[in-house]
Amino acid sequence: MSARPQRLLHDALLASADRSPAKTAIIADGTSYSYAALLDAALRLARALQDNGVQRGDRVAVYLDNSWHAVIAIYGTLLAGAVLTVINPQTKAEKLAYMLDDSDARALVTEKSLAPVFLAALDTVPNVQCVICSGGVPERAGRSSADQYPVLDFDETLASTEPRPSARGVIAIDLAALIYTSGSTGNPKGVMLTHQNMVFAAASISEYLRLDSSDRIVCVLPFAFDYGLYQLLMSVLLGATLVAERSFVYPVPVIKRAIEYEVTVFPIVPTIGATLLALNRSGGWTLPNVRRVTNTAAALPAEFITRLPTVFPNALIFAMYGLTECKRVAYLEPERVLEKPTSVGKAIPGTEVFLLSPDGAPVAPGETGVLHVRGPHVMLGYWNQPELTAAMLKPGRFPGERVLCTHDLFTMDADGDLYFVGRSDDIIKTRGEKVSPVEVENVLHRIAGVREAAVVGVPDENLGEAIRAFVVLDDGVVMTEQQVKRECMERLESFMVPRDVVFLRDLPKTPTQKVKKAELRAGSWSAGRSQLTG
């Protein structure tokens, strides 16, 4: 008899716990937890949420670091028939209040150390009717005594609750998660993803990465970032082991634990790659047990691809591209990364991609077009944002079909491989020419001594926009603005050479390690300064 197909996101936990109950599912804060323990705890939390009023389709906000309690909360929410909303624990009170209010969350799962923030947020959000808090119950100021909400101790609640949630009749096309993603302006948008969307994406990604139950995946990115969340989802789907790290702020201890726990999969973003390469140069750190390195969030500079084998001598390196609205779009097989180091490859298994001109016409190989995506992973839309949804989801090939218009610019070669040009709003228009920041950044990353680089356009009365490069140097390296420009002039057309080069100690980044280009554009700078002002 064949195994039951996975229809709901949490079916994978049921299957893995049934197949390998004693196997380590999660390693967090130095402690190992089995699949049986995870399922038991998640079932108990699911029942507790239901006992406190959470109904099918209600939103439950998980406001926690990557931890054992966060994993329980994620699967407990799903087993309760509710919709998951993971919120980065670095989120401040005003933004937290917005997300709780916008999602109409009924419950909040969090920890005592975050009480000053979440209590302030809850003062203005009456829809949250229950808080489950790890680390103890905080003293409360907040809503009036006539409008209070229970705050329950996480561990005590699990101990006193039976692992028997009520069946809620959830089906594959119901919402599984609202994943909030920042736009170029305004408040974050809630991406609506169904169980079907997320089950398909996790399976497709696991397939092309060639992962299996023997893998140990380290996750240094927050579960609030879909790249981080999917490390957990894929690990549970495969019956593998996840090593959950709270952050990559202190990289050396993370590397030591990755060695200790014999991690085989290491997901990165370019800024993490830059840090690993710098540590390798200064201290010789390597991770020989790693068999897979993945990259997304931003294009991995070609220079990094050729140098990463010094850190990961036995790993296959996957260049990838995606966006929250469909999780993952494309990947390049590791056997071809040296052949096509600037490509992100083809569509992930079971999906289709194509490029169109701004007026909707197909573009020829080598020409720039807007990337469109078809597949079961495409979001339902943005929560409470019909106009933004209409801008992203366009009529497809068949009646009623909706295709994701990414608004990102790509070229496609004769083999069908994609090359990222830039986001539509990132393209710099200078001297009547269009410049891709990515192209300039790739050149900057090839300069010896440059650890990180970011390029933006800034207003200029004569040029329209001027190109400004922000550069972080390796420790001990000294370089001048003119040296950087000379290197650029040797590799770029004159109109692509940065007018300004600004040296920084660090690039401003989001909690998911994306460079804050909007902050770089908005800052007041003079060339050669080492800090942002204004």
Image: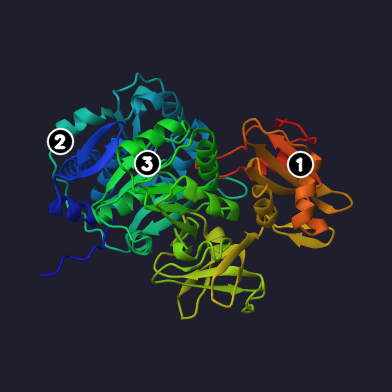
Q: Residue 225's spot in the image, x, y percent?
A: 45, 46
Q: Residues within 10 Å of mark 2 (few under 14, many from 20)?
A: some
| Residue at the spot 43% in from the left edge and 67% down from the top edge | 348
Q: Locate the C terminus and report the quarter of the image it occupies.
A: top right
Q: Nearer the viewer, residue 128 or 304?
A: 304
Q: Secondary structure at mark 3?
A: strand
**Marks 1 and 2, the one that precedes in the sequence:** 2
Nearer to us of marks 1 and 3 is 1
Q: Residue 58's spot in the image, x, y percent?
A: 33, 48
The residue type indicated by label 3 comes to Ala
Q: From the viewer's perspective, is 222 left or right of 42?
A: right
Which residue bears the numbered disc 2?
A: 161
Which residue bears the numbered disc 1?
A: 501
| Numbered circle sitting on residue 94 | none
The residue type indicated by label 1 comes to Val
> Gap in Å between the C-alphas at discs 1 and 2?
60 Å
Which residue bears the numbered disc 3?
A: 61
Q: Secondary structure at mark 2?
A: loop
Extreme residue toward the bottom, this view? 398
